[in-house]
Image: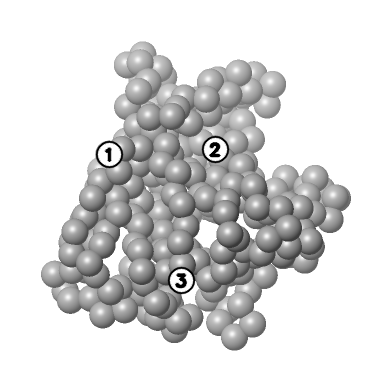
Amino acid sequence: MEISRLSGVGAEITGVDIRHLSDNEYEGIKSAFTENGLIFFRDQHLTEEDHIAFAKRWGEININRFFKANDKYPEIAMVTKEGHQEQNIGGGWHTDHSYDQEPALGSILVAKELPESGGDTWFTSMYKAYDSLSDGLKETLERMRAVHSAHYAFGTKSGDKQSGGTGGRIGNSDVADALENPVHPVVITHPLSGRKALYVNRAFTLHFENWSVEDSAPLLEYLYDIAIRDEFVTKFQWRPGSVAFWDNRATWHYAQNDYQGQRREMHRITLEGCALS
């Protein structure tokens, strides 16, 4: 097994079959995940049962409330775009599940059907985003908290719902409407690595606690711009057999929507996380 760190964020792991991991291999992969917050595998041949079994080695599976589930395996959320659909899922910088009181640990995404070209996923490091801030801004942000919400992305009033862009791929808008908006630290101490990371994102962060949306916007936009500096970003090109496993507390991701007229099917399992501090 070889672990190669990538220049932006993450590490690619080769020479291993994740269906049949020895204890030493698993510990090596766990260390790489903890250190990098993002790991990639190539040339894997996972069935749905294999995908679920690998996920369960890491923790309890989160059954997604909003994505369409696999018909036979409810643990697997379908991230699919048909050839006739214009809008994809995840087509903007975000981190999953920050709208939960206990945000998800991360997700394991398996490529099932890919377009001839395009459909890459971009990732960026929230460790590096935090590290790049001035000491004064770090000190300020470490005393702040921010409000997150699923309402605008998945609720009945979301722009996507109004446009019908999901084509039935996302549902349960009433569940999103009923969720209480959580408040999370703007800077977290990562529960695995112990490192500090910036924890806001454009998709689900509404405003800073005790600040208005209008007053919050300039500082949030500044932080969002920092987070996607080129030197922090890895642009992952999917191939048949590719698997990505990202940590939602340490990364953002962005599914590119540059394959109009072609089909793309990905299977995603999300893992339960914990409260952040």
Nearest the viewer among 49 and 200 is: 49
User: Tag 3: Cα neighbours inside 10 Å, few (<14), some, or many (≥20)?
Assistant: many
At which x and y percent is residue 204? 61, 42
Residue 218 seen in the current view: yes
Report how far apart the C-alphas of labels 3 and 2 lie in the structure.
23 Å
Instruction: Examine the rendered structure and indicate whether residue 178 appears above or below residue 75.
Output: above
At which x and y percent is residue 78? 61, 69
**Callout 2 amino acid:** Asn
The residue located at (59%, 85%) in the rendering is: 72
Which numbered marker is on residue 201? 2
Instruction: Mark 2 and mark 1 in contact? Answer it, CB < 8 Å.
Output: no
**Quarter placement of the C terminus:** top left
For label 1, the SS is loop
**Quarter placement of the N terminus:** bottom left
Report how far apart the C-alphas of labels 1 and 3 lie in the structure.
25 Å
Instruction: Examine the rendered structure and indicate whether residue 191 appears above or below residue 206.
Output: below
Report how far apart the C-alphas of labels 2 and 1 lie in the structure.
18 Å
**Callout 1 amino acid:** Arg
Nearest the viewer among 38 and 63 is: 38
Q: Quadrant of residue 273?
A: bottom left
Q: Earlier in the sequence, mark 1 or mark 3?
A: 3
The residue located at (35%, 51%) in the rendering is: 38
Q: Is residue 107 left or right of residue 180?
A: left
Which residue carries the number 1 mark?
195
Which residue carries the number 3 mark?
61
The residue located at (67%, 70%) in the rendering is: 68
**Callout 3 amino acid:** Ile
Which numbered marker is on residue 245? none
For label 2, the SS is loop
At which x and y percent is residue 236? 44, 49
Q: Which residue is at the far front? A: 116
